[in-house]
Image (cartoon, rainbow, N blue to C red):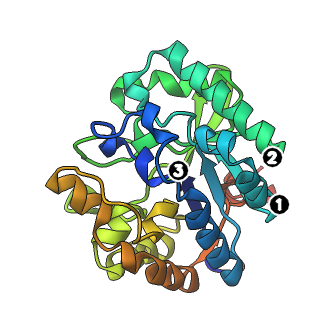
Amino acid sequence: MPVLNAMTIDVEDYFHVSAFASVVSPAEWSRLDSRVTDSTEKVLGLLEQAGVHATFFVLGWVAERFPSLVRRISDDGHEIASHSFDHGLVYDKSAELFREDLRRAAGAIRDACGVQVRGYRAPSYSITERSMWALDVLAEEGYDYDSSIYPIHHDRYGVPTWTRHIHAMERGSRTMWELPGSTVRHFGVNLPVGGGGYFRLLPYGWTKRGIRRLNDVEGQPAVFYLHPWELDPGQPRLNVGLATRIRHYHNLAKTEGRLRELLKDFRFGPVRDVLRLQAAAEQPSDNAR
């Protein structure tokens, strides 16, 4: 049977992205035209057509304002996890502010759909070498897994020396899973194939070949991620710099078609199912005991 890859969706609005923080403050969010419900509904429809369940990392701000959307995601059988409350970068917070944000997000999600979250993904993969303490806070708060570390070089995030594949790690007295952003290794360098901007900006063949290599050559699942706003070419254009405009707006009109292809080309499921298979694979067989 083909490898089961993790399909993950970061539920946030177009104006929440970290690169827009200099032009849109959190105080302005409630006054902007929200498009998160419609764009997430589009993602849900594509997943339903493909018969795929995913993990939705929900921003607490979204859960608080659009609880019916979060209930819809949960009622459709998808896994709900946390994407923080305010989309603030972890390495810009203290440990206590991070803990407060975790609890506020978990409470908003629980109030929206009755789910106690067990998974977390930091905004903009902002658990880096200077914020590794966040993993200990997550363990103390009872989280089972994290997906906040990208083992690449990047101007805003990344831990290039981090383990590339899904793995269990000990944090204090608790074992927690880490699901790094997916990469392939060429000439001693980790190259990203895990979705998001890399899925939009680069040809689809790059992602397809990368996941195929992970599955067929390395025998490992990919961790793929996407934002609902990436399927919304009609979103308002904000006055940002050239690099940010390219990263955020380029190829928005192509994302939906590419996602349809991806869902046909590979086997996907939520994080909970991928980790269940991972844990089973790491158990010693009867013959090895």
Tell me the quarter of the picture where residue 243 sits: bottom left
Badge 1 or badge 3: first in the primary sequence: 3
Give the crowd class for mark 3: few <14, some 14-19, many >=20 residues within 10 Å: many
Name the amino acid type tagged 3.
Glu
Which percent across, then down, holds residue 99? 59, 20
Q: Nearer the viewer, residue 267 or 40?
A: 40
Which percent across, then down, holds residue 242? 15, 56
Residue at the location (40% across, 36% down)?
126
Query: Badge 3 is on which residue?
Result: 12
Q: Nearer the viewer, residue 267 or 91?
A: 91
Badge 1 or badge 2: first in the primary sequence: 1
Q: Is residue 110 above or below residue 130?
A: below
The span from disc 3 to disc 2 (Cα, nearest Å) is: 17 Å
Give the crowd class for mark 1: few <14, some 14-19, many >=20 residues within 10 Å: few
Badge 3 or badge 2: first in the primary sequence: 3
- Left/right placement of residue 238 relative to residue 42 reads left
The span from disc 1 to disc 2 (Cα, nearest Å) is: 9 Å
Query: Badge 1 is on which residue?
Result: 75
Residue at the location (37% across, 33% down)?
128
Query: Badge 2 is on which residue?
Result: 113
Residue at the location (61% across, 28% down)?
102
Tell me the quarter of the picture where residue 245 sits: bottom left
Q: Contact (CB < 8 A) between labels 1 and 2?
A: yes
Identity of the residue furthest to the left in this view: 242
Which percent across, then down, holds residue 100? 60, 19
Mark 1 lies on a secondary structure that is helix
Residue at the location (63% across, 36% down)?
176
Which percent across, then down, holds residue 178? 55, 43
